[in-house]
Amino acid sequence: MEFHHVPVLYKEVLESLAVKPDGVYVDGTVGGAGHASGICERLNENGHFIALDRDRVALETAEKRLAQYPCRKTFLHANYSEVDRIREIAPQVDGILLDLGVSSYQLDTPERGFSYMHDAPMDMRMDEDETFTAYDLVNEYEEKELCRIIKEYGEERFASRIAKFIVKARSEAPIRTTGQLVEIIKEAIPAKARRTGPHPAKRTFQAIRIEVNGEFDHLREAVDRMPDLLAPGGRFAVITFHSLEDRIVKESFNKRLHPCTCPPDLPVCVCGKVADVRKVTRKPLTASEEELEENPRARSAKLRVIEKLG
């Protein structure tokens, strides 16, 4: 299957980044090069585009699709949290984009094991060079830890029952496929609850994917450190797709915006810490009705943008 990913909030991202023709821009989740194409289209031969992705297929696809643009391009098989690798290439950059959504290619390629809509081996690795998979998690984690992950990362109210049913099922035989896991989850969730809301396995699959790929640890590292790469006037744009991601980004941005550590009852700041960024978007930007008609997966997308002060 060809790597395909419809970029969400495309117009909003490009407007927010305010791409300079001779600037240096980083896409930490280049995917199918949807947003990247728009950035590279605005760069001239003096511009520099740095693309990162954990998925080798994504990176190879992006390299082919961006070949037509005249700007200098660097492709890194890396996690966006590897800030020092970016700094080695460009000590300062004019813009950074993180699109945290799972690509359509990953969801729709059954053998990757991301989707509860296909029966496939339990995998869910974004980087296929890694060895830890969803199979290892589902078959080896203790019930208490399974419950925590499903509850915390999936915000699943039946996490305890799902964890209990998983442990019971694997005691009889290893859980090898996504289809098996879906059936176990369905058994664990009461029939009345299954009839309303999203697919009964959606939240659990989200939680397992997040844990397998260490997504939140990498995100915290990236959003805390990436603003240090920005040149004065440089912008950092992040697209999130669920409340847990958005909370991490919002809290990290707020620390930058309000860095003072003085006790709140002190009348005057004595710590001397001042903000080195400003908000570009007062509230997170969301998809228009027109975009939602064309791409329903954009419904939960939120774009937050900050700018480095001079």
Image (tube, rainbow, N blue to C red):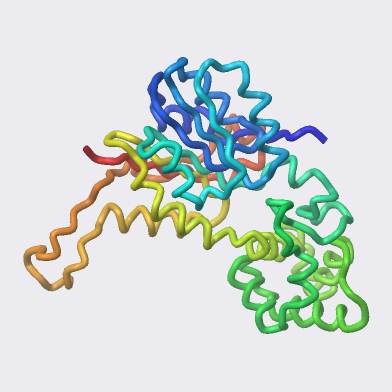
Assign the C terminus to one quadrant of the image: top left
The quarter of the picture where residue 261 lies is bottom left
Assign the N terminus to one quadrant of the image: top right
Identify the residue shown where x is 31% and y is 36%: 231
Please say whether residue 185 is visible from this viewpoint: yes
Identify the residue shown where x is 13% and y is 59%: 272
105 in relation to 25, above or below: below
Identify the residue shown where x is 74% and y is 71%: 137
State the residue in front, 80 or 170: 80
Residue, far front: 88
Tag count: 0
Q: Position of residue 150 (x, y in %)?
A: 66, 71
State the residue in front, 234 or 104: 234
Determine whether, in the image, residue 300 is placed left or right of residue 122. Answer: left
State the residue in front, 298 or 279: 279
Q: Position of residue 130 (x, y in %)?
A: 70, 57
Determine whether, in the image, residue 216 is placed left or right of residue 178. Answer: left
Determine whether, in the image, residue 48 is placed left or right of residue 3. Answer: left
Please say whether residue 196 is visible from this viewpoint: no
15 in relation to 98, above or below: above
Q: Position of residue 292 (x, y in %)?
A: 62, 36
The quarter of the picture where residue 305 lies is top left
Identify the residue shown where x is 76% and y is 77%: 140
Determine whether, in the image, residue 34 is placed left or right of residue 279. Answer: right
Residue, far left: 267
Residue, far right: 172
Q: Position of residue 95 (x, y in %)?
A: 41, 35
